[in-house]
Amino acid sequence: MMRPTHRHGRLRSIIPFIAAVALGPLAVIAAEEPALESGRDIYRAACASCHGSDGRGAPASLTTLDTAPPDFTDCDFANREPDGDWVGIAYEGGPSRGFSEFMPAFQGTLTVDQAQMAVDHIRTFCTDKRWPRGELNLPRALVTNKAYPEDEAVITTLIDVDDPGAVLNKFVWEQRFGPRSQWEVVVPFGWLETQDTIEDDGSTRWTSSMGDIAFAVKHAFHHNYEKGRIVSIAGEIIVPTGDEELGFGNGTTIFEPFIAYGQILPADFFFQAQVGGELTADKDKAPNAGFARCAFGWTTTSGQFGRAWSPMLEFTAGRPFTTNADIQYSAIPQMQVTLNKRQHIMFNLGARIPLNERDERKTQVIFYLLWDWFDGTLLEGW
Ligand code: HEC
């Protein structure tokens, strides 16, 4: 786990821990004489022996065993996980999500509702309300930006299957700072099929280059878990690092401000939207432009807490601010799926289908591989 702040304290007594693991959660509860009416009671009876009555991890009970319980008072850690993940861990045990077996399964001891009540109590340990809840971290669409500030690495690939061919990749590194902000770096690179001007016999060859690198900052200025919404403002600077001659860049600096909005809808549906503009330094190289994007989606899991599948339908509209330019519309049906047990590595596959100007614009295949790097390394949690 990449959570250095939780590895605190040294072992004082492993006896309660050994008892807990050996006898199972039932023994933990029985030993505490339960009055399991409130989340607090359930937490005290079933969880506090390891997690501590204050949520910081019981007297450092597990450190010699390699895995310490996390610090639930640490808002940076505690707010990003949605309830569903935590109830799943409590119900099915640590290994169900690729975590330590020292986190026992309470299935058969607690009902799902009771596990939820214990998690509700865990939520009271972080008292700083500035941190947006993990539920608002909606599945990432292929094109529409998320409003949620993230610790993610994403590599998106767009393939032009028609003549001339193109394979364009975009590597994005996103990192949170403070409760609601995030910076990111975008590095595009790819391969383009071009006419071979040396041979000049109509044959083509592939060239490769890096594109225009971009730097962005995003800030969630509004979020409300009860209302299920989050709104962010962001600004991106795209610098002309790409080889314009080869077709890998705009040849001018572009400033891209945008607003992103995420909304949880009933029955596991969600909606995301992004509206922004592109202001260019040199209008001869690239015109100013505006865009609007949105994504409707729905998430379902295999079994109660298993792999998450999120089909989405995205619509995009973009228009360069030049005379006679039309708005270009596209639809992008897609499916995101979590790949590993911890569900912090995801894949999304879709197709960008032009809805107008279909003679000049072709359908493209788009996919990404996403790594939520705060939740573990690439090799963890399988
Ligand atoms: C026997 C000790 C023990 C008991 C009892 C216990 N836990 Fe844990 N729990 C752990 C350990 C150890 C971890 C850290 C696992 C890891 O990081 O691999 C953990 C991690 C967790 C996590 C964090 C998962 C994440 O996202 O990092 C949650 C949530 C959790 N426990 C909930 C509960 C709840 C709710 C209860 C009571 C119903 C409970 N635990 C009882 C030992 C325990």
Image (cartoon, rainbow, N blue to C red):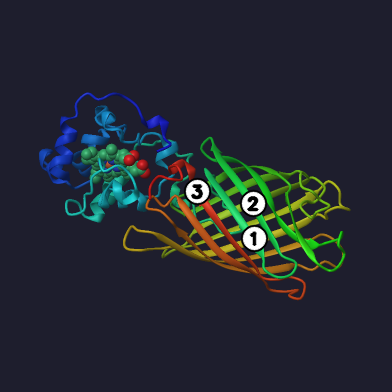
Residue located 71% across and 44% down the image = 213
Find residue 371 and name its label: 3
- Residue 361 spot, x, y in % from top left: 74, 70
The earlier-in-sequence mark between 2 and 1 is 1
- Residue 127 spot, x, y in % from top left: 40, 36
- Residue 61 spot, x, y in % from top left: 24, 29
Which residue has dot 2 on it?
170
Q: Secondary structure at mark 3?
A: strand
Say which quarter of the image contains residue 144: bottom right
For label 1, count other residues whose C-alpha is less than 10 Å away and answer few (under 14), some (14-19) or many (20+).
many
**Label 3 to label 2, Cα distance in Å?**
14 Å
Which residue has dot 1 on it?
158
Say whether residue 145 is visible. no
- Report the number of numbered marks: 3
Residue located 54% across and 65% down the image = 296
For label 2, count other residues whose C-alpha is less than 10 Å away and answer few (under 14), some (14-19) or many (20+).
some
**Left or right, 1 with reference to 190:** left
